[in-house]
Image (tube, helix red, strand yellow):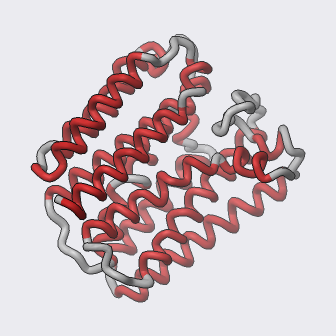
């Protein structure tokens, strides 16, 4: 298996959506040196890996076709359909990754003695299970963005701040909500071809998707230190929206731009917290 195929199978660039909340939460604490940061990164990355592999497994089980396999963000089970990995191996892998996420998360709760982290973690795991596992499968019912919003926005950002024993203010909350919206916009863009062509989500894409992006920039503008970041994200988002193609499959091929906006948001927010 070539390294590039492995990267595509894992959809590796999307893993930044797991790393970003921890980095932002850490920035709000002044990048205080703590071994807990590496543990929190392990929790979020293993959770992301588990969810991605679980989606691969259930996409194959439900005979979802492999599409956009020439991009870094293929739809469907690239490992199974393209690389010939056995479904049983994928199933073992996603169970192992989710188990690591839970055990590592519990170690954070033990080390910090903070039950709020336990509640946040259990809710995140519950939402992740509902996202991929039958019969609920939020991801296949057009509401997967709900789980994505909380699991890659408020929960990890605020959880990191709490774990590092720092006070949460309105700014941290707004930034975490904005990050959740951007993570949800990535999920929405990437999975749009899996929705019904004449369904609500596809038909109203040019309303729903821009609202996610624009709202994310507007919310952080409440903070004076985030004004520059908010303006930049707002302008970049508008340019991205204007040049989006019309068909769902073509739109999904632009996932890298949505991931880029998420990355830019993270860098600008961290710079605003550290420098301003």
View extreme (front): residue: 275
User: Residue 145 location, x and y as percent?
Assistant: 44, 40
> Which residue is painted at 60% across and 23% down in the image?
193
> Which residue is painted at 37% across and 69% down in the image?
119
Residue 64 in sight:
no
Image quarter in which the C terminus is found: bottom left
Which is nearer the eye, 21 or 272?
272
Which is nearer the eye, 118 or 153?
153
User: Residue 79 location, x and y as percent?
Assistant: 79, 46
Residue 136 in sight:
yes
53 lies left or right of 199: right
Residue 242 falls in image quadrant: top left
User: Residue 233 location, x and y as percent?
Assistant: 30, 37
> Which residue is painted at 84% across and 56% down in the image?
88
Q: Is residue 211 above or below residue 124?
A: above
Q: Is residue 90 above or below residue 164?
A: above
84 lies left or right of 224: right
> Which residue is painted at 47% across and 52% down in the image?
17
User: Residue 68 location, x and y as percent?
Assistant: 70, 28
């Amino acid at each position: 298996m070539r390294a590039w195929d492995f990267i595509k199978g894992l959809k590796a660039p999307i893993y930044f959506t797991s790393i970003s909340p921890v980095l932002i939460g850490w920035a709000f604490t002044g990048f205080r040196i703590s071994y807990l940061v590496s543990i929190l990164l392990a929790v979020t990355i293993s959770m992301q890996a588990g969810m991605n592999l679980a989606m691969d497994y259930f996409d194959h089980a439900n005979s979802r076709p492999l599409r956009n396999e020439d991009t870094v963000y293929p739809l469907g089970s690239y490992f199974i359909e393209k690389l010939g990995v056995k479904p049983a191996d994928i199933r073992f892998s996603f169970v192992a990754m989710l188990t690591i996420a839970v055990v590592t998360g519990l170690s954070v709760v033990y080390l910090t003695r903070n039950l709020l982290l336990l509640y946040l973690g259990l809710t995140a795991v519950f939402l992740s299970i509902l996202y991929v596992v039958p019969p609920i499968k939020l991801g296949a019912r057009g509401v997967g963005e709900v789980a994505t919003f909380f699991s890659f926005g408020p929960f990890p950002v605020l959880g990191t701040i709490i774990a590092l024993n720092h006070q949460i203010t309105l700014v941290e909350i707004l930034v975490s909500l904005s990050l959740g919206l951007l993570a949800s916009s990535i999920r929405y863009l990437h999975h749009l071809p899996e929705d019904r062509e004449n369904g609500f989500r596809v038909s109203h894409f040019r309303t729903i998707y821009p609202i996610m992006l624009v709202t994310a920039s507007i919310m952080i503008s409440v903070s004076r230190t985030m004004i520059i970041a908010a303006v930049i994200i707002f302008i970049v988002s508008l340019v991205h929206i204007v040049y989006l193609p019309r068909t769902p499959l073509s739109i999904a091929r632009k996932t890298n731009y949505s991931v880029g906006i998420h990355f830019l948001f993270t860098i600008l927010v961290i710079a605003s917290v550290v420098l301003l």
